[in-house]
Image: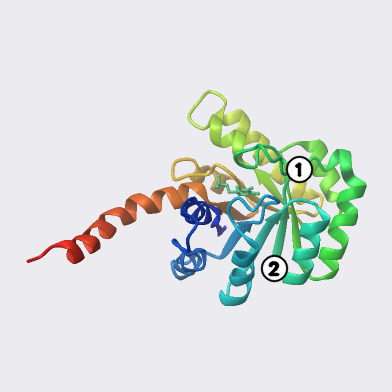
Amino acid sequence: MLLGVNIDHVATLRNARGGIEPSVLEAAKICIDAGANGITAHLREDRRHIKDSDILSLKNDLKCRLNMEMAATDEMQKIALNLLPDACCIVPEKRQEVTTEGGLDVFSQQEKIINFVEPLNNAGILVSLFIDPDEKQIRAAAKTQAKYIELHTGAFSIAFGTKNEQSEFLKLKNAAILAQSLGLKVNAGHGLNYQNVSRMREISGIEELNIGHSIISKAIFTGLDKAVKQMLDLVYIY
Ligand code: PXP
């Protein structure tokens, strides 16, 4: 399985101060140097974390696979067709949500998604549809010409360690089997962390996991000690 690191929350932190620190590009470089297989960034309509300049510099200044998450809007399609990221993951977007809450409803807007995917495919961008592990959605996704789906692992992540873990896990496993039988390639992500991620290895054929929040959160604790020591070196008068 490959790992795409979702870098959005480095931008969230930067935007909290409105300055240039921490740098999204620097963070992405560290992820790639550490062995990540790609960078994922969600350009939201409200630009609450990743901004246009971030996605541009990730594309131009970082030699790695870039997966741009975006809503199925004309604005985003235009940006993607200009930018030509390696991949686009189409997600639903609600202004009020804290993070992407549910999967894309491909079933009830199949025609719209088909039309949305076509120019991206023609431009050589690998398109994935972020959907819940739901048979109806998978069958609809298979009719859109998107090559990938990304299974929404949020419900599994919430259920992890509870009596519902296995049933949510089986939904993902069966969804992956069905999708592959219909010719779709399968990625997964959302809410995966250091505790629950190993269960994804029990699902054969998942190509890539996209993980953000838990990695950025972990980085605070693995890096804080070093950061304090470096500051102490500057502050202490020996
Ligand atoms: N995949 C998709 C489609 C997402 O929208 C997100 C969250 O932006 C992720 C993966 C990563 O989720 P998390 O930050 O919970 O790891």
* Residue 138 shown left or right of residue 176 in the figure: right
Q: Which residue is mark 1?
A: 104
Residue drawn where x is 80% and y is 54% of the image: 183
Callout 1–callout 2 Cβ contact below 8 Å: no
* Residue 55 shown left or right of residue 216 in the figure: right
Outermost residue toward the front in this view: 18
Can residue 143 be seen here?
Answer: no
Mark 1 vs 2, N-terminal side: 2
Q: Position of residue 148 (x, y in %)?
A: 74, 55
Question: Residue 84 occupies which quadrant of the picture?
Answer: bottom right
Residue neighbourhood size for the residue with mark 2, other residues' Cα within 10 Å, grouped as few (<14), some (14–19), many (≥20)? many
Outermost residue toward the left in this view: 238
Question: In this picture, is 70 found above or below 80?
Answer: above
Residue drawn where x is 70% and y is 63% of the image: 87
Q: Which residue is mark 2?
A: 85
* Residue 139 shown left or right of residue 230 in the figure: right
- Number of on-image labels: 2
SS category of the residue bearing label 2 = loop
> Which amino acid does the dot numbered 1 rest on?
Leu
